[in-house]
Each structure stands twice: as structure tokens, then as C-alpha cells.
Amino acid sequence: MSAPPVSGLPAKRKIGKSSLASGAFWTMMRRVVILAACVDVLLFILFSILESPLLAWLNVLGVAMYAAAYALIVRRANVAALVLVWLEVLGHAAAGTLLIGWESGFHYYLLMFIPAVVVSSSRGWALALVSALLTFYLGLDAVSRAYGPLTPLALHGLVTVKWINVAIVFAMFSTLARFYVGSVLRAEKRLHLLATRDSLTGLFNRRHFHALADHVVARSRRAGDPVSLIIADVDDFKRINDARGHDAGDKVLVHVGELLKNVCRDQDVIARWAARSSSSCCPTRTQQARRLPRSACARSPKRRPCRTQPATSAAPCRSVRPRFVPANRWQTRSGAPTVRCIAASPKGAIA
């Protein structure tokens, strides 16, 4: 016997077009198909030992159907592959139940469709598919009880088949649950990155910088330590964009971000502050913070298109022992130098 697909048919077109779910889903489908084919091979051996040739060769047919489904997935004929898998599961569950009885446990495989359909289908399709599955399940129960097993097994063989089917269902439920949890965690991680990171430079965005900087200021306030705020601005950035194009400007911003990440420490908060500016909140004193922009300029091998002035021409960077002020209320002083270093202050920048 085998496991059902990981989703309902009507939702597969949507999943196939989703860049987030498509790769993970079809990788999982390949694993399910391979695992189901291996289960059918084991059941072929079992029913051969139990001298039930009809069920044994039924598993051979199941292996062939799964092989065809795998080939269809590789060729991206996804809907056809799902239809084939569903037909195999429904047909195998019905045949096994009718041949050796309800107690064989083949009907348990039908229950695995329920979470898959509910999770991946719209409300209307999920209700329709679950209702159809319930009708099929109850009808199979009624028919099997009315006509009894057509090729009954001995009691010890029937119990063995039931235990094996129950173990397989438990294993497949665990596998599918792990897949769904992993998909949710990967989606949450990607959404967190989109919400907190600048897509171009990979630095924190300004909103997340405010939140992290508030924690840095609060921690420094409790410890009585100074906090320094550095704003690094790219000079003549508009001229770079006009002369060399926006792609060159993007490369400049990425390069500046890499330089800041290389010279800052793990406890420093680095972010893209504005279109051409980056910021760093450092729990350190003025002289230590002043070394950061100098180190960044010294490490840069590029003179063009990113032109920088010597670090000695940067405005002073001062540290303060701040009262707690939200980062979004910090004020910065405008100026022309390439690298401007200013301090966080309750009342604004300190000259």
C-alpha cells in the first residue's frame, strides 16, 4: 500500500506557480512516490509469503503506477502525476479492504487525504473533497461488511497486515507533518528577512534599526555605558547614478555595506539608513567609534566610482550616556562630508 499525495488536486496549479512552495512541494512528492513504491515492494513480498497472489500482484501494479507518476513529475506533468497517485491509493485501499476485510487496515490510508486536502485547497474545494472522501469511506465500510472478505487470510496473517499498515500510516503522517512544519518555518524565516533586511545591501532596514537601537540604548543606559551613532553617506551619489547608471550605484551601496559589516563588531547594529546612507549604532566610546569609518575607507580597493575623502575630514563622532529616547526620535545633523559621524542624543546631534 502507499501514501496519498500531499495536497488536493485543485490547489496544485497554484502551488506549481508559487516560487516559495513549488520546489519544496515537488521534492516532497518525489520522496512520497519513492517511499510508496518501496512500501508496495515490501507488501508484495509479504503477500507472497501469505500465499495471496492477487494482492501480491496488485502491489506490482502499484509500483508501476508510482514509477509512471515519478516520470510525470520529472517531466513537470504535475496534474497527471497527482491523478495517478490518487487513483492508486483509492483503488489499492478499496481492493485490499474488499479482498481481505475491513480489519486489514487498508482503509487507514484514505484518512491521510484529509489534512493534505484541507491545508492546500480552498475552503469550497476542501469541503467538496472531504465530503466525497467521507462518502467513499463509509461506502467501502458498508460494502466490505455486506459481502465479507473475498479472499480471507488466516488470523495471524490478517493481524500482521493490520499492524504493518498501521505502522506505515504512522510513519507517513509523521513525514507529512514534518514537511508542513518545515514549510511553515521556511516561510516565516523568509518573511522575517523581507521585513527586517534591505533587499539590496542585505543590511537591516531603517524600521528594524529603530527597534534594535532602542534595545542598545536601553541596555547602555542600565549599564551606564556610552552609545555612538554613525551615519556614513556616499558623496556625489547622484552623479554616480547619472554618469554610470543605477546598476553602478547599486554596486556602490552594496560595497559600502560590505565594508561596514567587515569593520563592525557583532554587538554593533548596522542598517541602511536612507537611499545613499548607512548607519551603525555602537555601544562604545567616541575614539573607538571613530575608527570604524576610517577602517572602512582603508579597506576599500575602489577609488571610482565610489570617491571618498580621507577619514580625517569626517565630522566628529561623539558618544553620550543617553536617557532612553526611541530611535525614531533621534535627530541627525545634515552636512556635506563623505562620512559623517554623529552621536545619539535626547535633544539631537551633538556638535
Image: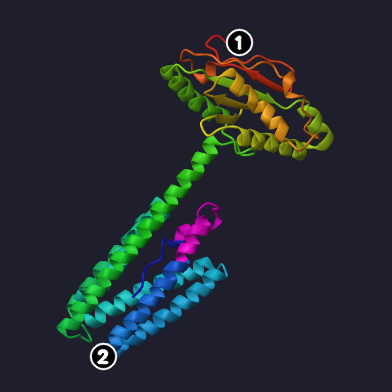
Q: 75 or 245: which is nearer to us?
A: 245
Side (left or right) of 134 relative to 349:
left
Q: 12 or 336: which is nearer to us?
A: 336
Disc 1 vs disc 2: which is toward the camera? 1
Q: Quadrant of residue 7?
A: bottom left
Place of residue 241 in the rendered image (x, y in percent of width and height, measured from the top left):
79, 33
Per the picture, the main secondary structure of the magenta-coloured stretch is helix
- How many other residues sit within 10 Å of disc 2, few (<14), some (14-19) or many (≥20)? few
Q: Quadrant of the C terminus?
A: top right
Residue at (36% x, 76% y) in the render: 39
Residue that numbered label 2 is attached to = 51
Earlier in the chain: of badge 1 and badge 2, it is: 2
Q: Is residue 62 magenta?
A: no
Assess whether mark 2 and mark 1 are in contact (beta carbons under 8 angstroms): no
Q: Secondary structure at mark 1?
A: loop
Q: Quadrant of residue 204?
A: top right
Amino acid tagged 2: Glu
Residue that numbered label 1 is attached to = 350
Q: Secondary structure at mark 2?
A: loop
Residue at (45% x, 44% y) in the render: 188
- For the magenta stretch, what is the residue range? 10-29
